[in-house]
Image (spheres, rainbow, N blue to C red):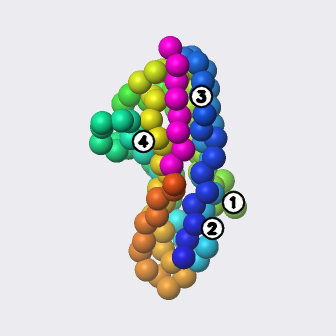
């Protein structure tokens, strides 16, 4: 089994910054990709940023230039640095990892979600 522990959400004024963290633990042989998604009230969950094992990164157009995804491979942890936050960034943020287990099975896991609220 694999566990994800998210932290770092909160309330911030527009223009402020937050840093989200997501640490993965458990029977992980390798990590294929780590990413962040978000879901605002009444909207579908959307991709925010994703980083794969090859180092390739994709960002949603709405966050390019403001958010930065990074990874500490030694700690199996992914971060999302969010700067210049806007009220429309308000959502529950979820991390997701795509892994290969110690049994060489492909699996994916979601974090429990952390609330980010940006006030105007």
The reply to whether the magenta stretch includes residue 110 is: no
Q: Main SS type for the magenta part?
A: strand
Q: Residue at left 42%, top 41%? A: 38
Q: Is residue 93 visible?
A: yes
Report helix, strand or loop for mark 3. Answer: strand
Q: Earlier in the sequence, mark 1 or mark 2?
A: 2
Q: Is residue 60 visible?
A: no
Q: Position of residue 35 (x, y in %)?
A: 47, 50
Q: Quadrant of residue 40?
A: top left
Report helix, strand or loop for mark 1. Answer: helix
Q: Residue at left 48%, top 43%? A: 93
Q: Position of residue 62 (x, y in %)?
A: 38, 28
Q: Which residues are magenta?
A: 113-120
Q: Tell me the distance, in whole angstroms, between the alpha carbons under discs 1 and 2.
A: 9 Å
Q: Earlier in the sequence, mark 2 or mark 3?
A: 3
The residue pinned by badge 2 equals 25
Q: Earlier in the sequence, mark 1 or mark 3?
A: 3
**81 relative to 92 in the view: left or right:** right
Q: Earlier in the sequence, mark 3 or mark 4?
A: 3
Q: Earlier in the sequence, mark 4 or mark 1?
A: 4
Res. 38 mark: 4
- Of circles 2 and 3, the one toward us is 3
Q: Tell me the distance, in whole angstroms, between the alpha carbons under discs 1 and 3.
A: 27 Å
- Of circles 1 and 3, the one toward us is 3
Q: Residue at left 61%, top 57%? A: 5
The residue pinned by badge 3 equals 11
Res. 75 mark: 1
Q: Position of residue 14 (x, y in %)?
A: 54, 17
């Amino acid at each position: 089994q694999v566990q994800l522990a998210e932290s770092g959400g909160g309330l911030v004024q527009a223009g402020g910054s937050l840093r989200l963290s997501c640490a993965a633990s458990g029977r992980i042989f390798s990590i294929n990709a780590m990413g962040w998604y978000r879901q605002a009230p009444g909207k579908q969950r959307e991709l925010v940023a994703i980083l794969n094992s090859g180092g390739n990164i994709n960002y949603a157009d709405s966050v390019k230039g403001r958010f930065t995804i990074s990874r500490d491979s030694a700690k199996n942890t992914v971060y999302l640095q969010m700067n210049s936050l806007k009220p429309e960034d308000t959502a529950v943020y979820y991390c997701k990892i795509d892994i290969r287990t110690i049994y060489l099975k492909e699996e994916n896991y979601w974090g429990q979600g952390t609330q980010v609220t940006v006030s105007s």
